[in-house]
């Protein structure tokens, strides 16, 4: 970015390839906007390793890759989702957020994973 500013480059001659994904607002509490997702897989890992639901995965390849629920079903039709909200709490970009709140309005529970591990270890 610094080099581009020094050379006064304001635009790119190469068009940006972006597949506009459809937003999934079918869940009763949460919304998934795949256009904001950076595929960090935090949601996939927390669903698998902490919740044990295995509801999320990465589907497709290349620029078509996105987080999917079960077998690429709408979130509301997911049989394995427990609606715990852990995926929403760990999303760094706001691709997953609560209905009625914008991603910037959400208060993240920063220690949610640590607290869950400690609570489950004490049982």
Image (cartoon, rainbow, N blue to C red):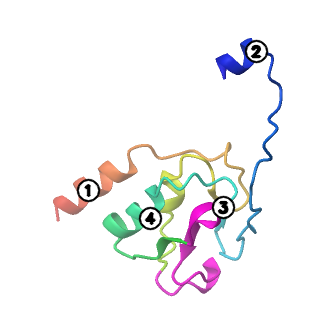
Say which mark, if any, is on residue 44.
4
Q: Residue furthest top?
A: 6
CA gap, disc 3 and disc 2: 33 Å
CA gap, disc 2 and disc 1: 50 Å
Asked if labels 2 and 3 touch by Cβ distance under 8 angstroms, the answer is: no
Placement of 2 over or under 92, stated as above or below: above
Q: Which residues are magenta?
A: 60-80
Left or right of 115, for residue 104: right
Q: Residues within 10 Å of mark 1 (few under 14, many from 20)?
A: few
Q: For the residue labelled by badge 4, is the local secondary structure a helix, a strand or a loop?
A: helix
| Lower position in the chain sequence, tag 3 or tag 1 | 3
The residue to which callout 2 is attached is: 7
Q: For the residue labelled by badge 3, is the local secondary structure a helix, a strand or a loop?
A: loop
Given this view, does label 2 or label 4 mark the residue nearer the observer? 2
Q: How many marks?
A: 4
Residue 91, horizontal then vertical, whole percent = 53, 52
Asked if labels 4 and 2 touch by Cβ distance under 8 angstroms, the answer is: no
Say which mark, if any, is on residue 34.
3
- Residue at (65%, 75%) from the top-left corner? 27
- Residue at (57%, 44%) from the top-left corner? 107
| Lower position in the chain sequence, tag 1 or tag 4 | 4
Asked if labels 4 and 1 touch by Cβ distance under 8 angstroms, the answer is: no
Residue 102, horizontal then vertical, whole percent = 72, 50
Given this view, does label 1 or label 4 mark the residue nearer the observer? 4
């Amino acid at each position: 970015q610094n080099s581009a500013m020094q050379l006064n480059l304001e635009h790119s001659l190469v068009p940006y390839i972006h597949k506009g994904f459809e937003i999934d607002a079918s869940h009763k509490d949460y919304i998934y906007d795949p256009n904001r997702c950076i595929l960090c897989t935090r949601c996939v890992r927390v669903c698998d390793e902490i919740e044990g639901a295995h509801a999320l995965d990465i589907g497709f390849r290349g620029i078509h890759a996105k987080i999917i629920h079960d077998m690429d079903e709408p979130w509301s039709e997911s049989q394995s989702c427990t609606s715990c909200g852990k995926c929403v709490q760990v999303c760094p970009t706001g691709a997953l957020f609560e209905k009625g709140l914008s991603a910037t309005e959400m208060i993240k529970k920063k220690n949610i994973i640590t607290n869950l591990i400690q609570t489950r270890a004490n049982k």
